[in-house]
Protein backbone atom coordinates (compact mmCIF):
# COMPACT_ATOMS: atom_id res chain seq x y z
CA UNK A 1 0.00 0.00 0.00
CA UNK A 2 1.18 3.55 -0.77
CA UNK A 3 2.55 4.88 2.57
CA UNK A 4 0.55 8.09 2.15
CA UNK A 5 -2.78 6.39 1.61
CA UNK A 6 -5.25 6.65 4.49
CA UNK A 7 -7.81 3.84 4.71
CA UNK A 8 -11.41 4.77 5.41
CA UNK A 9 -13.21 2.43 7.80
CA UNK A 10 -16.89 3.33 7.91
CA UNK A 11 -18.81 2.48 11.08
CA UNK A 12 -22.13 4.18 10.25
CA UNK A 13 -23.90 0.82 10.49
CA UNK A 14 -22.35 -0.05 13.86
CA UNK A 15 -21.32 2.97 15.97
CA UNK A 16 -23.55 5.27 13.86
CA UNK A 17 -26.52 3.03 14.43
CA UNK A 18 -25.85 3.30 18.18
CA UNK A 19 -26.97 6.97 18.00
CA UNK A 20 -30.03 7.05 20.24
CA UNK A 21 -33.08 6.75 17.95
CA UNK A 22 -31.15 5.92 14.76
CA UNK A 23 -32.20 2.30 14.47
CA UNK A 24 -32.33 0.89 10.93
CA UNK A 25 -34.03 -2.23 9.61
CA UNK A 26 -32.13 -4.90 7.67
CA UNK A 27 -32.99 -3.66 4.22
CA UNK A 28 -32.15 -0.04 5.14
CA UNK A 29 -28.75 -1.26 6.36
CA UNK A 30 -28.24 -3.06 3.08
CA UNK A 31 -29.11 0.10 1.10
CA UNK A 32 -26.57 2.09 3.12
CA UNK A 33 -23.92 -0.62 2.66
CA UNK A 34 -24.39 -0.45 -1.13
CA UNK A 35 -24.08 3.35 -0.95
CA UNK A 36 -20.86 3.02 1.10
CA UNK A 37 -19.49 0.62 -1.47
CA UNK A 38 -20.23 3.15 -4.27
CA UNK A 39 -18.52 5.79 -2.13
CA UNK A 40 -15.43 3.58 -2.12
CA UNK A 41 -14.84 3.05 1.61
CA UNK A 42 -12.16 0.47 2.36
CA UNK A 43 -13.98 -1.23 5.24
CA UNK A 44 -17.66 -1.37 6.23
CA UNK A 45 -18.25 -2.21 9.88
CA UNK A 46 -21.66 -3.73 9.26
CA UNK A 47 -22.72 -4.36 12.85
CA UNK A 48 -22.19 -6.18 16.13
CA UNK A 49 -23.49 -9.68 15.26
CA UNK A 50 -23.68 -11.02 18.82
CA UNK A 51 -25.78 -8.07 20.03
CA UNK A 52 -29.05 -9.15 18.35
CA UNK A 53 -30.48 -11.49 15.74
CA UNK A 54 -31.29 -8.41 13.62
CA UNK A 55 -27.65 -7.30 13.66
CA UNK A 56 -26.48 -10.82 12.87
CA UNK A 57 -28.84 -11.06 9.89
CA UNK A 58 -27.88 -7.61 8.59
CA UNK A 59 -24.14 -8.37 8.74
CA UNK A 60 -24.70 -11.69 7.00
CA UNK A 61 -26.81 -10.12 4.27
CA UNK A 62 -24.26 -7.36 3.68
CA UNK A 63 -21.46 -9.94 3.65
CA UNK A 64 -23.39 -11.87 1.01
CA UNK A 65 -24.41 -8.99 -1.25
CA UNK A 66 -21.92 -6.15 -0.92
CA UNK A 67 -18.61 -6.69 -2.66
CA UNK A 68 -15.68 -4.32 -2.89
CA UNK A 69 -15.05 -3.15 0.67
CA UNK A 70 -13.88 -5.46 3.44
CA UNK A 71 -16.91 -6.37 5.57
CA UNK A 72 -16.24 -6.22 9.29
CA UNK A 73 -18.14 -7.39 12.38
CA UNK A 74 -17.54 -6.18 15.93
CA UNK A 75 -17.01 -8.63 18.79
CA UNK A 76 -16.08 -8.23 22.45
CA UNK A 77 -13.03 -10.24 23.52
CA UNK A 78 -15.18 -13.31 24.18
CA UNK A 79 -15.50 -16.65 22.46
CA UNK A 80 -19.24 -16.39 21.84
CA UNK A 81 -18.99 -12.90 20.32
CA UNK A 82 -16.12 -13.83 18.02
CA UNK A 83 -17.75 -17.05 16.84
CA UNK A 84 -20.98 -15.22 16.07
CA UNK A 85 -19.11 -12.51 14.15
CA UNK A 86 -17.21 -15.16 12.19
CA UNK A 87 -20.42 -16.99 11.31
CA UNK A 88 -22.16 -13.84 10.04
CA UNK A 89 -19.11 -12.82 7.97
CA UNK A 90 -18.63 -16.21 6.35
CA UNK A 91 -20.21 -15.24 2.96
CA UNK A 92 -17.96 -12.16 2.55
CA UNK A 93 -15.23 -12.20 -0.08
CA UNK A 94 -13.09 -10.06 2.24
CA UNK A 95 -13.88 -10.26 5.95
CA UNK A 96 -12.52 -8.72 9.13
CA UNK A 97 -13.22 -9.44 12.79
CA UNK A 98 -12.85 -6.42 15.06
CA UNK A 99 -12.41 -7.43 18.68
CA UNK A 100 -12.05 -5.06 21.63
CA UNK A 101 -11.50 -4.91 25.38
CA UNK A 102 -11.38 -1.99 27.84
CA UNK A 103 -7.84 -0.75 28.52
CA UNK A 104 -8.13 2.22 30.90
CA UNK A 105 -8.00 1.59 34.64
CA UNK A 106 -11.52 3.02 34.92
CA UNK A 107 -12.81 0.32 32.54
CA UNK A 108 -10.71 -2.48 34.03
CA UNK A 109 -11.65 -1.75 37.65
CA UNK A 110 -15.27 -0.67 37.35
CA UNK A 111 -16.62 -2.34 34.24
CA UNK A 112 -14.59 -5.48 33.62
CA UNK A 113 -13.20 -6.22 37.13
CA UNK A 114 -9.98 -7.41 35.53
CA UNK A 115 -6.33 -6.86 36.37
CA UNK A 116 -4.06 -5.56 33.65
CA UNK A 117 -2.48 -8.98 33.09
CA UNK A 118 -5.91 -10.66 32.86
CA UNK A 119 -6.83 -8.04 30.25
CA UNK A 120 -3.74 -8.90 28.20
CA UNK A 121 -4.51 -12.62 28.48
CA UNK A 122 -8.08 -12.10 27.27
CA UNK A 123 -6.93 -9.91 24.37
CA UNK A 124 -4.40 -12.53 23.24
CA UNK A 125 -7.01 -15.29 23.39
CA UNK A 126 -9.54 -13.19 21.48
CA UNK A 127 -7.15 -12.20 18.71
CA UNK A 128 -5.91 -15.81 18.32
CA UNK A 129 -9.47 -17.10 18.07
CA UNK A 130 -10.41 -14.39 15.55
CA UNK A 131 -7.31 -15.28 13.50
CA UNK A 132 -8.54 -18.87 13.29
CA UNK A 133 -11.45 -17.53 11.18
CA UNK A 134 -9.71 -14.83 9.10
CA UNK A 135 -6.28 -13.36 8.44
CA UNK A 136 -7.70 -9.85 8.86
CA UNK A 137 -8.13 -9.07 12.57
CA UNK A 138 -8.49 -5.66 14.15
CA UNK A 139 -7.91 -5.14 17.86
CA UNK A 140 -9.11 -2.12 19.86
CA UNK A 141 -7.99 -1.27 23.39
CA UNK A 142 -11.22 0.51 24.33
CA UNK A 143 -10.87 3.90 26.08
CA UNK A 144 -7.22 4.08 24.98
CA UNK A 145 -7.44 7.88 25.25
CA UNK A 146 -7.55 7.55 29.07
CA UNK A 147 -5.36 4.46 29.46
CA UNK A 148 -1.87 4.41 30.98
CA UNK A 149 0.37 4.60 27.87
CA UNK A 150 2.92 2.14 29.31
CA UNK A 151 0.20 -0.51 29.75
CA UNK A 152 -1.22 0.39 26.34
CA UNK A 153 2.12 -0.30 24.63
CA UNK A 154 2.31 -3.72 26.32
CA UNK A 155 -1.28 -4.60 25.36
CA UNK A 156 -0.80 -3.55 21.73
CA UNK A 157 2.45 -5.50 21.44
CA UNK A 158 0.73 -8.64 22.79
CA UNK A 159 -2.22 -8.22 20.39
CA UNK A 160 0.10 -7.91 17.39
CA UNK A 161 2.09 -10.96 18.52
CA UNK A 162 -1.20 -12.87 18.73
CA UNK A 163 -1.98 -11.92 15.11
CA UNK A 164 -3.78 -8.55 15.00
CA UNK A 165 -3.18 -6.84 11.66
CA UNK A 166 -4.83 -3.51 12.54
CA UNK A 167 -4.51 -1.78 15.91
CA UNK A 168 -7.28 0.71 16.47
CA UNK A 169 -6.81 3.43 19.08
CA UNK A 170 -10.23 4.60 20.31
CA UNK A 171 -10.85 7.81 22.18
CA UNK A 172 -14.05 6.20 23.40
CA UNK A 173 -15.30 9.11 25.49
CA UNK A 174 -14.06 11.98 23.30
CA UNK A 175 -11.78 13.26 26.05
CA UNK A 176 -8.42 13.72 24.36
CA UNK A 177 -7.23 16.82 22.45
CA UNK A 178 -5.47 16.88 19.06
CA UNK A 179 -2.02 17.69 20.42
CA UNK A 180 -2.22 14.87 22.97
CA UNK A 181 -3.70 12.38 20.51
CA UNK A 182 -1.05 13.07 17.85
CA UNK A 183 1.56 12.56 20.60
CA UNK A 184 -0.05 9.27 21.68
CA UNK A 185 0.07 7.87 18.11
CA UNK A 186 3.69 8.97 17.77
CA UNK A 187 4.60 7.33 21.08
CA UNK A 188 2.90 4.07 20.02
CA UNK A 189 5.05 4.06 16.89
CA UNK A 190 8.16 4.68 18.96
CA UNK A 191 7.47 2.32 21.88
CA UNK A 192 5.71 -0.75 20.47
CA UNK A 193 8.53 -2.85 18.98
CA UNK A 194 6.37 -4.83 16.50
CA UNK A 195 4.09 -1.92 15.43
CA UNK A 196 5.38 -2.12 11.84
CA UNK A 197 3.43 -5.42 11.51
CA UNK A 198 0.09 -3.63 11.92
CA UNK A 199 -1.76 -0.63 10.55
CA UNK A 200 -2.57 2.00 13.16
CA UNK A 201 -6.20 3.04 13.07
CA UNK A 202 -8.04 5.69 15.10
CA UNK A 203 -11.62 5.92 16.34
CA UNK A 204 -12.53 9.31 17.80
CA UNK A 205 -15.72 10.41 19.51
CA UNK A 206 -16.99 13.95 19.38
CA UNK A 207 -17.93 14.76 22.98
CA UNK A 208 -15.75 17.89 22.93
CA UNK A 209 -16.27 18.53 19.22
CA UNK A 210 -12.74 17.28 18.46
CA UNK A 211 -13.33 13.96 16.66
CA UNK A 212 -12.28 15.21 13.22
CA UNK A 213 -9.34 17.28 14.55
CA UNK A 214 -8.10 14.34 16.63
CA UNK A 215 -8.33 11.97 13.65
CA UNK A 216 -6.42 14.47 11.52
CA UNK A 217 -3.71 14.87 14.20
CA UNK A 218 -3.44 11.06 14.31
CA UNK A 219 -2.79 10.64 10.58
CA UNK A 220 -0.20 13.41 10.68
CA UNK A 221 1.58 11.25 13.26
CA UNK A 222 1.45 7.94 11.44
CA UNK A 223 -2.07 6.47 11.72
CA UNK A 224 -3.21 5.09 8.35
CA UNK A 225 -6.82 4.14 8.99
CA UNK A 226 -9.60 6.42 10.21
CA UNK A 227 -12.84 5.09 11.62
CA UNK A 228 -15.67 7.45 10.80
CA UNK A 229 -19.36 7.72 10.02
CA UNK A 230 -21.54 9.51 7.49
CA UNK A 231 -22.75 12.85 8.91
CA UNK A 232 -20.71 12.14 12.06
CA UNK A 233 -23.39 9.85 13.51
CA UNK A 234 -22.49 7.73 16.50
CA UNK A 235 -22.83 7.06 20.19
CA UNK A 236 -23.64 10.29 22.15
CA UNK A 237 -22.16 13.29 20.27
CA UNK A 238 -21.08 11.00 17.44
CA UNK A 239 -17.89 9.98 15.68
CA UNK A 240 -15.48 11.60 13.26
CA UNK A 241 -17.53 12.70 10.20
CA UNK A 242 -16.37 10.81 7.09
CA UNK A 243 -17.18 13.67 4.69
CA UNK A 244 -15.16 16.15 6.75
CA UNK A 245 -11.99 14.13 7.27
CA UNK A 246 -11.98 12.93 3.64
CA UNK A 247 -12.37 16.48 2.31
CA UNK A 248 -9.65 17.80 4.65
CA UNK A 249 -7.23 15.25 3.21
CA UNK A 250 -8.34 15.98 -0.36
CA UNK A 251 -8.42 19.78 -0.11
CA UNK A 252 -5.05 19.95 1.66
CA UNK A 253 -3.34 17.07 -0.15
CA UNK A 254 -0.61 19.33 -1.54
CA UNK A 255 0.34 20.45 1.97
CA UNK A 256 0.14 17.15 3.83
CA UNK A 257 0.64 14.59 1.06
CA UNK A 258 -2.02 12.20 2.38
CA UNK A 259 -4.94 10.83 0.35
CA UNK A 260 -7.88 8.39 0.41
CA UNK A 261 -9.52 6.37 -2.38
CA UNK A 262 -12.98 7.80 -1.65
CA UNK A 263 -15.11 8.76 -4.64
CA UNK A 264 -16.00 12.15 -3.19
CA UNK A 265 -18.73 12.86 -5.77
CA UNK A 266 -20.87 10.26 -3.93
CA UNK A 267 -20.68 12.17 -0.63
CA UNK A 268 -23.80 14.36 -0.95
CA UNK A 269 -25.99 11.49 -2.09
CA UNK A 270 -24.77 9.13 0.65
CA UNK A 271 -25.23 11.81 3.30
CA UNK A 272 -28.81 12.43 2.14
CA UNK A 273 -29.64 8.72 2.15
CA UNK A 274 -28.24 8.18 5.65
CA UNK A 275 -30.00 11.27 6.95
CA UNK A 276 -33.35 10.11 5.58
CA UNK A 277 -33.07 6.51 6.69
CA UNK A 278 -31.89 7.30 10.20
CA UNK A 279 -34.21 10.31 10.58
CA UNK A 280 -31.28 12.52 11.65
CA UNK A 281 -31.47 15.74 9.62
CA UNK A 282 -28.16 17.38 8.74
CA UNK A 283 -27.75 20.78 10.37
CA UNK A 284 -27.80 23.62 7.81
CA UNK A 285 -24.35 24.93 8.61
CA UNK A 286 -22.68 21.50 8.80
CA UNK A 287 -19.34 21.40 6.96
CA UNK A 288 -19.40 19.77 3.50
CA UNK A 289 -22.98 18.41 3.51
CA UNK A 290 -25.05 21.15 5.22
CA UNK A 291 -27.54 23.06 3.04
CA UNK A 292 -25.54 26.26 3.58
CA UNK A 293 -22.08 24.73 3.09
CA UNK A 294 -21.79 26.29 -0.38
CA UNK A 295 -24.28 29.17 -0.05
CA UNK A 296 -22.91 32.70 -0.23
CA UNK A 297 -25.22 35.18 1.45
CA UNK A 298 -23.44 38.50 1.84
CA UNK A 299 -23.26 40.82 -1.16
CA UNK A 300 -19.48 41.10 -0.88
CA UNK A 301 -19.10 37.29 -0.96
CA UNK A 302 -21.53 36.87 -3.86
CA UNK A 303 -19.70 39.55 -5.81
CA UNK A 304 -16.36 37.86 -5.10
CA UNK A 305 -17.55 34.39 -6.12
CA UNK A 306 -19.03 35.74 -9.36
CA UNK A 307 -15.69 37.36 -10.21
CA UNK A 308 -13.64 34.33 -9.23
CA UNK A 309 -14.93 31.26 -7.37
CA UNK A 310 -11.75 30.84 -5.34
CA UNK A 311 -12.29 34.16 -3.56
CA UNK A 312 -14.67 32.51 -1.10
CA UNK A 313 -14.87 28.83 -2.15
CA UNK A 314 -12.22 26.29 -1.16
CA UNK A 315 -14.12 23.27 -2.54
CA UNK A 316 -15.99 23.08 -5.83
CA UNK A 317 -19.47 21.79 -4.81
CA UNK A 318 -19.36 19.30 -7.70
CA UNK A 319 -16.42 17.56 -5.97
CA UNK A 320 -18.81 16.32 -3.29
CA UNK A 321 -21.64 15.62 -5.70
CA UNK A 322 -23.61 18.86 -5.82
CA UNK A 323 -24.36 19.68 -9.42
CA UNK A 324 -24.84 23.40 -9.94
CA UNK A 325 -26.06 25.71 -12.71
CA UNK A 326 -28.27 23.13 -14.35
CA UNK A 327 -31.70 23.86 -15.67
CA UNK A 328 -34.35 22.36 -13.42
CA UNK A 329 -36.80 19.91 -14.99
CA UNK A 330 -40.42 21.05 -15.37
CA UNK A 331 -43.97 19.84 -16.16
CA UNK A 332 -43.13 19.35 -19.83
CA UNK A 333 -40.01 17.27 -19.19
CA UNK A 334 -40.45 13.71 -20.44
CA UNK A 335 -39.49 10.36 -18.98
CA UNK A 336 -36.30 10.32 -21.00
CA UNK A 337 -35.15 13.65 -19.55
CA UNK A 338 -35.93 12.38 -16.06
CA UNK A 339 -34.02 9.16 -16.70
CA UNK A 340 -30.91 10.92 -17.97
CA UNK A 341 -30.92 13.52 -15.16
CA UNK A 342 -31.26 10.72 -12.60
CA UNK A 343 -28.39 8.86 -14.28
CA UNK A 344 -26.24 12.01 -13.94
CA UNK A 345 -27.13 12.04 -10.26
CA UNK A 346 -25.96 8.42 -10.00
CA UNK A 347 -29.32 6.62 -9.97
CA UNK A 348 -29.83 3.77 -12.43
CA UNK A 349 -33.55 2.88 -12.27
CA UNK A 350 -35.16 -0.10 -13.95
CA UNK A 351 -38.30 0.45 -16.09
CA UNK A 352 -40.75 -0.12 -13.23
CA UNK A 353 -38.85 2.13 -10.83
CA UNK A 354 -38.64 4.82 -13.49
CA UNK A 355 -42.41 4.64 -14.10
CA UNK A 356 -43.08 5.06 -10.37
CA UNK A 357 -40.59 7.94 -10.08
CA UNK A 358 -42.11 9.61 -13.15
CA UNK A 359 -45.61 9.63 -11.66
CA UNK A 360 -44.29 11.28 -8.52
CA UNK A 361 -42.17 13.68 -10.59
CA UNK A 362 -45.13 14.78 -12.76
CA UNK A 363 -47.24 15.33 -9.69
CA UNK A 364 -44.54 17.55 -8.18
CA UNK A 365 -43.76 19.34 -11.45
CA UNK A 366 -47.45 20.22 -11.90
CA UNK A 367 -47.48 21.80 -8.47
CA UNK A 368 -44.04 23.43 -8.41
CA UNK A 369 -43.30 24.06 -12.11
CA UNK A 370 -39.58 23.54 -11.44
CA UNK A 371 -38.12 20.36 -10.00
CA UNK A 372 -34.56 20.66 -8.72
CA UNK A 373 -31.91 17.96 -8.31
CA UNK A 374 -32.59 17.93 -4.56
CA UNK A 375 -36.28 17.24 -5.26
CA UNK A 376 -35.34 14.39 -7.60
CA UNK A 377 -33.03 12.84 -5.02
CA UNK A 378 -35.81 13.11 -2.46
CA UNK A 379 -38.28 11.39 -4.85
CA UNK A 380 -35.97 8.48 -5.65
CA UNK A 381 -34.80 8.03 -2.08
CA UNK A 382 -38.43 7.95 -0.95
CA UNK A 383 -39.28 5.28 -3.55
CA UNK A 384 -36.28 3.21 -2.47
CA UNK A 385 -37.26 3.63 1.14
CA UNK A 386 -40.78 2.45 0.37
CA UNK A 387 -39.28 -0.57 -1.36
CA UNK A 388 -37.24 -1.35 1.73
CA UNK A 389 -40.20 -1.27 4.11
CA UNK A 390 -42.98 -3.82 3.99
CA UNK A 391 -46.17 -1.83 3.47
CA UNK A 392 -49.10 -2.64 5.74
CA UNK A 393 -50.94 0.69 5.49
CA UNK A 394 -51.14 3.43 2.86
CA UNK A 395 -52.69 6.88 3.08
CA UNK A 396 -55.75 7.22 0.82
CA UNK A 397 -57.37 10.50 1.86
CA UNK A 398 -56.70 13.27 4.31
CA UNK A 399 -58.92 16.22 5.12
CA UNK A 400 -57.98 18.79 7.72
CA UNK A 401 -60.09 21.50 9.33
CA UNK A 402 -58.12 23.89 11.50
CA UNK A 403 -57.92 27.49 12.54
CA UNK A 404 -58.86 29.07 15.85
CA UNK A 405 -61.49 26.36 16.51
CA UNK A 406 -61.00 22.65 17.08
CA UNK A 407 -58.45 21.11 14.71
CA UNK A 408 -59.95 18.00 13.12
CA UNK A 409 -58.41 15.39 10.83
CA UNK A 410 -60.47 13.00 8.71
CA UNK A 411 -58.25 10.18 7.60
CA UNK A 412 -58.75 7.23 5.31
CA UNK A 413 -56.07 4.57 5.13
CA UNK A 414 -55.89 1.23 3.39
CA UNK A 415 -54.90 -1.94 5.19
CA UNK A 416 -53.15 -3.75 2.35
CA UNK A 417 -52.79 -7.02 4.20
CA UNK A 418 -56.54 -7.31 4.75
CA UNK A 419 -57.58 -5.38 1.67
CA UNK A 420 -59.86 -3.01 3.58
CA UNK A 421 -60.30 0.74 3.87
CA UNK A 422 -60.46 2.32 7.32
CA UNK A 423 -61.76 5.78 8.02
CA UNK A 424 -62.15 7.98 11.08
CA UNK A 425 -62.06 11.61 12.26
CA UNK A 426 -60.23 12.90 15.30
CA UNK A 427 -59.70 16.10 17.21
CA UNK A 428 -56.23 17.19 18.24
CA UNK A 429 -54.33 20.04 19.82
CA UNK A 430 -53.31 21.03 16.28
CA UNK A 431 -53.61 19.54 12.78
CA UNK A 432 -50.62 17.22 13.13
CA UNK A 433 -51.82 15.93 16.49
CA UNK A 434 -55.31 15.37 15.00
CA UNK A 435 -53.76 13.30 12.15
CA UNK A 436 -51.70 11.34 14.62
CA UNK A 437 -54.71 10.62 16.87
CA UNK A 438 -56.82 9.48 13.90
CA UNK A 439 -54.17 7.14 12.50
CA UNK A 440 -53.37 5.77 15.94
CA UNK A 441 -57.00 4.93 16.44
CA UNK A 442 -57.24 3.17 13.06
CA UNK A 443 -54.12 1.05 13.42
CA UNK A 444 -54.87 0.38 17.09
CA UNK A 445 -51.28 0.12 18.28
CA UNK A 446 -50.53 2.00 21.50
CA UNK A 447 -47.42 3.81 20.29
CA UNK A 448 -46.10 7.12 21.58
CA UNK A 449 -45.02 9.93 19.25
CA UNK A 450 -41.70 11.11 20.67
CA UNK A 451 -40.30 13.30 17.92
CA UNK A 452 -41.64 15.24 14.97
CA UNK A 453 -39.62 17.50 12.70
CA UNK A 454 -40.15 19.23 9.36
CA UNK A 455 -37.68 20.84 7.05
CA UNK A 456 -37.80 21.88 3.43
CA UNK A 457 -36.01 20.05 0.62
CA UNK A 458 -35.42 23.25 -1.34
CA UNK A 459 -36.08 26.94 -0.78
CA UNK A 460 -39.37 28.70 -1.55
CA UNK A 461 -42.96 28.70 -0.33
CA UNK A 462 -43.84 25.83 -2.71
CA UNK A 463 -40.93 23.63 -1.58
CA UNK A 464 -41.40 20.01 -0.57
CA UNK A 465 -41.46 19.50 3.18
CA UNK A 466 -39.59 16.51 4.58
CA UNK A 467 -41.12 15.14 7.76
CA UNK A 468 -39.31 12.86 10.15
CA UNK A 469 -41.21 11.19 12.93
CA UNK A 470 -40.16 8.86 15.72
CA UNK A 471 -42.55 6.63 17.60
CA UNK A 472 -41.91 4.45 20.60
CA UNK A 473 -43.51 1.08 21.14
CA UNK A 474 -42.42 -1.12 24.04
CA UNK A 475 -39.09 0.71 24.40
CA UNK A 476 -38.16 0.32 20.75
CA UNK A 477 -38.04 3.36 18.49
CA UNK A 478 -39.29 3.40 14.89
CA UNK A 479 -38.44 6.23 12.49
CA UNK A 480 -40.78 7.35 9.71
CA UNK A 481 -40.01 9.73 6.89
CA UNK A 482 -41.94 11.26 3.98
CA UNK A 483 -41.78 14.28 1.68
CA UNK A 484 -44.62 16.19 0.03
CA UNK A 485 -45.43 19.75 -0.97
CA UNK A 486 -48.21 19.55 1.63
CA UNK A 487 -46.55 19.09 5.01
CA UNK A 488 -49.72 17.65 6.57
CA UNK A 489 -49.81 14.93 3.90
CA UNK A 490 -46.08 14.37 4.51
CA UNK A 491 -46.80 14.12 8.25
CA UNK A 492 -49.49 11.47 7.75
CA UNK A 493 -47.29 9.49 5.36
CA UNK A 494 -44.28 9.73 7.68
CA UNK A 495 -46.35 8.45 10.57
CA UNK A 496 -47.62 5.53 8.46
CA UNK A 497 -44.03 4.82 7.37
CA UNK A 498 -43.08 4.44 11.05
CA UNK A 499 -46.18 2.31 11.71
CA UNK A 500 -45.29 0.07 8.74
CA UNK A 501 -41.86 -0.54 10.24
CA UNK A 502 -43.44 -1.28 13.59
CA UNK A 503 -45.89 -3.73 11.97
CA UNK A 504 -43.07 -5.39 10.06
CA UNK A 505 -41.33 -5.86 13.37
CA UNK A 506 -44.41 -7.29 15.02
CA UNK A 507 -45.12 -9.32 11.88
CA UNK A 508 -48.78 -9.13 12.61
CA UNK A 509 -51.36 -6.48 12.11
CA UNK A 510 -53.96 -6.14 14.86
CA UNK A 511 -57.58 -6.46 13.84
CA UNK A 512 -58.95 -3.18 12.48
CA UNK A 513 -61.10 -1.44 15.02
CA UNK A 514 -62.87 1.17 12.99
CA UNK A 515 -65.67 1.35 10.48
CA UNK A 516 -64.88 -0.75 7.42
CA UNK A 517 -66.20 1.05 4.38
CA UNK A 518 -65.75 -1.70 1.82
CA UNK A 519 -65.02 -5.29 2.72
CA UNK A 520 -63.29 -5.76 -0.66
CA UNK A 521 -61.95 -3.02 -2.81
O1 LIG B 1 -15.75 3.96 21.01
C1 LIG B 1 -15.21 2.85 21.07
O2 LIG B 1 -14.29 2.61 21.85
C2 LIG B 1 -15.72 1.81 20.19
C3 LIG B 1 -14.91 0.55 20.13
C4 LIG B 1 -15.75 -0.65 20.04
C5 LIG B 1 -13.91 0.66 19.00
O3 LIG B 1 -16.70 2.00 19.51
ZN1 LIG C 1 -17.11 4.21 19.32
Image (spheres, grey):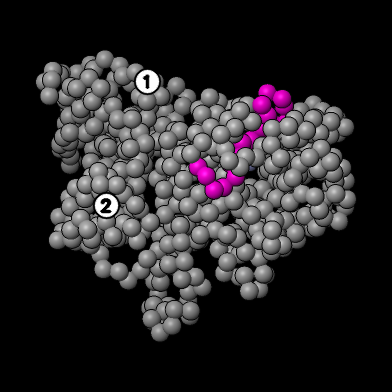
The crowd level at tag 2 (other Cα within 10 Å; few <14, some 14-19, many 20+) is: many
Residue 330 percent across, percent down from the top left: 19, 61
What residue is at 22 percent from the left and 19 percent from the top? 418
Q: Residues within 10 Å of mark 1 (few under 14, many from 20)?
A: few
Q: Earlier in the sequence, mark 2 or mark 1?
A: 2
Q: Which residues are magenta?
A: 66-83
- Quadrant of picture, ligand 2: top right
Element carrying mark 2: loop
**Residue 484 or 425: which is nearer the viewer?**
484
Q: Which mark is residue 380?
A: none
Q: Would you place residue 398 above or below residue 51 in this image?
A: below
Q: Is residue 448 visible?
A: no
**Foreground: 487 or 501?**
501
* Residue 511 in the figure: left or right of residue 212: left
- Give the Cα separation between the discs numbered 2 and 1: 32 Å
| Magenta region includes residue 49 | no
Q: Which residue is mark 2?
A: 464
Q: Is residue 460 left or right of residue 502?
A: left
Expressed as whole percent of the image width and height from the top left, the position of residue 86 reads 64, 31
Q: Which residue is mark 1?
A: 507
Amino acid sequence: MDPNRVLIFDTTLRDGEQSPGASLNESEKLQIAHALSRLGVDVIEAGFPYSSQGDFNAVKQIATEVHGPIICGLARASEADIEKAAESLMPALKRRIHTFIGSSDIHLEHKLKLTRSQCIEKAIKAVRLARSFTDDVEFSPEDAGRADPIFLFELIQAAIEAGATTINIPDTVGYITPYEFGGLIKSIKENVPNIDKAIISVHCHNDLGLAVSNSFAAVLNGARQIECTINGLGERAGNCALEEIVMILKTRQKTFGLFTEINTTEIARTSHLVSNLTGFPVQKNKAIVGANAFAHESGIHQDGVLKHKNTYEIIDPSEVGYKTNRLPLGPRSGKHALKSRLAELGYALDALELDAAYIRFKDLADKRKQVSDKDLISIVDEKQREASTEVFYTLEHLQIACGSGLPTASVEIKNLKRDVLLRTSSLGTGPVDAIYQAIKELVDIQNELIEFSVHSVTEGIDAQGEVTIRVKYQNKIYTGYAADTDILVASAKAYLNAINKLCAYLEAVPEPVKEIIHEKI
